[in-house]
Image (tube, grey):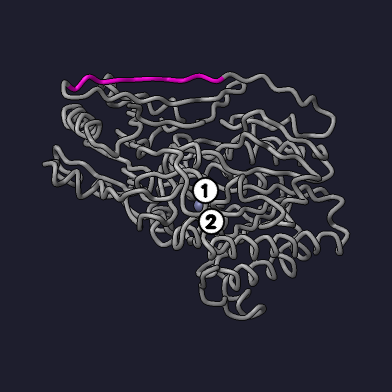
Amino acid sequence: MSSVLVFIFDGLQPAQVNPRLMPNLAAFASEGVTFTNHHSVFPSVTRVNASSMVTGMASGGHGLSGNRLMIREFDSDKAMPAMEPELAQVARSGVPVLLAPTLGQILAEHGKEYVAIGVGTSGNMYLHNPTAEDSGGATIHPTFALPADLHESLIDRFGPWPEETKPNTMRMAHATRIMTEYVLPEREPAVALIWSSEPDKSQHAAGVGSHLSDTSIREADGQFGDILQWLNESGRAEDTDIIVASDHGYSTISEIAGVEALVHEAGFALGGDEGGVVVAQNGGAALFYTQPGDLDTTKRLAAWLMSQPWCGTITASDAVPGIPGTLPASLVGNEGPRVPELTMSFKWDSLTNEAGYAGTAYSTYGEPGTGQHGSMSKHEMNNILFARGPRFKSNVKLDAPSGNYDVTPTILRILGLSGGEGMYGRVLEEALEGAPSEVAWTVEIHEAEYDMGVKTYKQQIKISTVGTTSYVDEGNSVG
Ligand SMILES: [Zn+2]
């Protein structure tokens, strides 16, 4: 039976995939397909991208706008963290957590399963299959499982989950054991996914290219190797297509700008009342929700943001049209029922950090010198994708644009299943055995500017497009 295994290295950048740090992944990449022009989804945070991976949609389509976000139909007064307890509460209130069908739901309609296991945040894993309790499949995390009773039964069988450490190797080893002793041999899901929280956790803590980050990458690569070895020894490698990706790239924090406090200090009321602004900070990006119809506050807020030294791009929703200097949220895939009125990416550059990794940016929190992501920096929007297996070509590098929302349509095509037709992402045909490798695509730079008297704010967003699927290459303010 044909099946797909997905392995995610959270926050891994292309420059980190080399034989010194990652002997297993580097060898895997040279044997299979390397996508050299892969894209994260903006905002380049984990849970937006996890949601895109399982729905085939950009953030406007799936509605999970940030790691912190406001879901107006649930609570129109404040932002909330997208963690399992909060998201489960949204679901219990009758509000769908994701606005598009998920891989788990689509597979269930075909009588198949999606089983995901991961050791990052509870919110990340919850988003893989929010309706698993009803629609089938399973999600496994150290603090919960869906269906709920699976959590205790796995503890009975495999023992308690180890404590979180830096690097998070013990927890991931436990997850790897559950994957190779239970999920793959016993459940035999059509699609299995395992999500390593490294190098993300170590890069947030100690920086990109730090000793901790490099150690975390070596250890996560070893765990990837353990899974490959299990597939080989069990005879499953021949009918398993393997996809390896990261959710986003990384930058080094240059300076902190606590946008929510700064907006308040600038005289804007915080909160969901008349004239108020709800701010959801997302590391390298910030989401701003104004009251429906309050174009005046939104315009003043946009102009104030544009006057700040840390302001990169500003996109505006269709609900607040015609604000000078902004570009439309639809350009970057964010337009939809839950789009914030304004979304800002911080300003970034390509300076290198102490360890020689390019990319620095402002952040809403953290310590300068440590790692961050969330912005429209090319160092965060460009991430990794590799594939190897019976349906994929061997030993090729492809330079056509690809993105995290292409993962699910491509998986469904490999399995010969319908359900991916209405998705924003595309089937990565060029990677499949027997298909032509050539892909036509275009690159466009979109600009907007606003003359504020003392200075002119100007932003540029670069977009690559294949057919009807667009990818955000990068976006920043200029000058
Ligand atoms: Zn991440």
Q: Which residue is mark 1?
A: 357
Classify mark 1 as within 8 Å of ligand 1 or not, answering yes or no: no
Residue 297 is a magenta residue? no
Residue 377 location (% of width, % of height)? 45, 38
Asked if residue 469 is positioned above or below residue 222 in the image, the reply reads above
Residue found at x 50% / y 25%: 463
Q: Which residue is mark 2?
A: 209
In the image, farthest residue toward the left: 267
The quadrant of the rendering that contains the C terminus is top left
Q: State the predominant SS element of the stretch in magenta.
A: strand
Residue 447 is a magenta residue? yes
In the rendered structure, find residue 36 and report the number of the disc placed on it.
none
Confirm or deny contact between disc 2 and disc 1 (CB under 8 A).
yes
Q: How many marks?
A: 2
Q: Nearer the viewer, residue 11 or 337?
A: 11
Q: Nearer the viewer, residue 306 or 296?
A: 306
- Cα separation, mark 2 vs mark 1, equals 7 Å
Asked if residue 169 is positioned above or below residue 40 in the image, the reply reads below
- Other residues around mark 1 within 10 Å, as few (<14) / some (14–19) / many (≥20): many
Q: Is residue 89 left or right of residue 8?
A: left
- Other residues around mark 2 within 10 Å, as few (<14) / some (14–19) / many (≥20): many
Q: Is residue 318 left or right of residue 216?
A: left
First in residue order: circle 2 vs circle 1: 2
Asked if residue 50 is positioned above or below residue 336 in the image, the reply reads below
Residue found at x 51% / y 72%: 164
Residue found at x 21% / y 29%: 303
Per the image, label 1 sits on a secondary structure element best described as loop
Q: Which residues are magenta?
A: 443-452
Three-letter code for the amino acid on which mark 1 is drawn: Tyr
Q: Nearer the viewer, residue 353 or 223?
A: 353
Per the image, label 2 sits on a secondary structure element best described as loop
